[in-house]
Image (cartoon, rainbow, N blue to C red):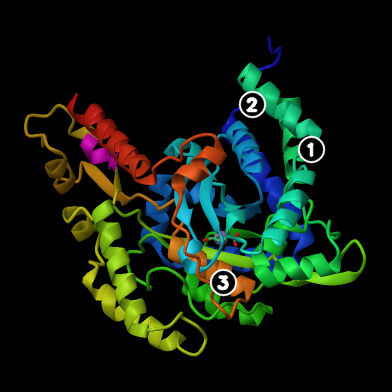
Amino acid sequence: MPTAAFVSPDDIRKGFSRAMSDMYRDEVPLYGALMALVADTNAGVLASDQGLAQHLQRTGEITRLDMERHGAIRLGTAAELATLCRLFAVMGMQPVGYYDLTPAGVPVHSTAFRAVHEHALNTSPFRVFTSLLRLELIENPELRAFADSALAKRSIFTPAALALIESAERDGGLNAEDADEFIRQALETFRWHHTATVTGAQYQQLSDQHRLIADVVAFKGPHINHLTPRTLDIDQVQAAMPGRGITPKAVIEGPPRRHCPILLRQTSFKALDEPIAFTDAKGSHSARFGEIEQRGVALTPKGRALYDRLLNAARDELGAFPNEGNAARYTQLMEQHFEAFPDDYAQMREQELAYFRYFVTERGLAARGTRDQPRTLDALIAAGHVDVEPLVYEDFLPVSAAGIFQSNLGDAAQSHYAANSNRAQFEKALGRQTIDELTLYAETQQRSIAECTGALLA
Ligand code: OOG
Ligand code: NI
């Protein structure tokens, strides 16, 4: 029997997220500069936009904004993914969504580990985009065998981390002392290594096959490759980046700028070239980059279908991957096509394009039980007894992710893989099913409706 009370998984995640951010800031100073820029921009936006400040207050997002970030790692084997899934479970993070990046020429498939309940998300929204390399896509059999054996030799978790995962699973949690130790030990898996496990020539061979394959196979562990803060105005940050010595990629991924932001907009700066000691020579490797993002309302399947259709139409008309040369035209095409997407929360709600949360107002409470109190949700909203707030998107976008991968792998030549998307194979490696993100949004929306009707109409 445990002697001390367990620390909640949400608090372990919060502590881990802070520890990861501190480690990354020490290792990549430009990340510190980006964090400062985002903090300044967010403070400016909140000061000038009272409405937005109030809305973030109501949903609880205001308290999580400063600590909100996501990271990304790339794993080499099914066993690594399965153990990582158990490690994240100790922090209340579950695999949400399945992303196939092979159509974009990146030989991985991925999920996002994150908290799933709105209360847990407000305590710490920390997420990790986690990719598994698809070794079967390496065409050269000798190179594939070499990659296989290099990965089989490494062990990316410390013995103490493994022991603490087991005790958390066995006892149902960790006490304060163990939780602190768990955070220290888990952090080791994500640390950067200045030494590679292969020779310079082997690294080159792997890299010639795909830069990402070298990034996974040549190192002791899956170093965190970026940590992304959330901004309230991505265009402002993008414009201010050069002034702080940061060069952003040419286009912002995701939807165009709107009054009512939808889904997710992201931009990044290029990976740094960092010195590496191979087993026989000195060289360099680039993997770590910086990214920022702005989050908007989560879309229903109908809204998402409209988003995908408009995005594809704009890209088809551009006729090429967005890049420096066609960035202005791309922005223009995106704005033009997205005129077909209502830029108004009330319309999005009426047309069932997005998810919302509902909150009881003071007026609603005061009118409770009175004779002419409205009896339906729509009537309660119209009477000001219930407020409507957009439900924030917590996940990722495959086309955007591919754009981020590509800009940082610096791959001019796009590779194409014939392989099909393979969720079943991914879930077999993971040791469980991934959670459907749309179900989570629908549940959060439903809970907030039940709270309102429970408080006002019961
Ligand atoms: C992950 C790239 C995807 C995002 O925010 O979409 C990503 C990686 O480069 O490992 O982080
Ligand atoms: Ni990212």
Looking at the rendered structure, the kind of residue marked 1 is Thr
Element under disc 2: loop
Viewer-proximal residue among 201 and 319: 201
Residue that label 3 marks: 406
Report crowding for label 1: few under 14, some 14 to 19, many 20 or more residues within 10 A (C-alpha). few
Mark with earlier residue (2, 1):
2
Which part of the image, by quadrant, shows the C terminus? top left
* Disc number placed over residue 374 in the picture, else none: none
**Residue 286 horizontal/vertical position (percent):** 73, 69
Mark 2 or 1: the one toward you: 1
**Would you call the spot at circle 3 few (<14 residues within 10 Å), some (14-19), or many (20 or more)?**
some
Q: Position of residue 188 (x, y in %)?
A: 77, 45
Residue 413 visible? The answer is: yes
The answer to whether marks 2 and 1 mark residues whose Cβ atoms lie closer than 8 Å is no
Residue under pointer 1: 158
Of mark 1 and mark 3, the one earlier in the sequence is: 1
Closest to the observer, 353 or 387: 353
Highlighted range, magenta: 358-364
What mark, if any, has residue 7 been given in the picture?
2
The residue furthest bottom is: 325
The residue positioned farthest toward the top in the image shown = 1
For badge 3, the amino acid type reads Gln
Query: Where's ligand 2: which quadrant?
Result: bottom right
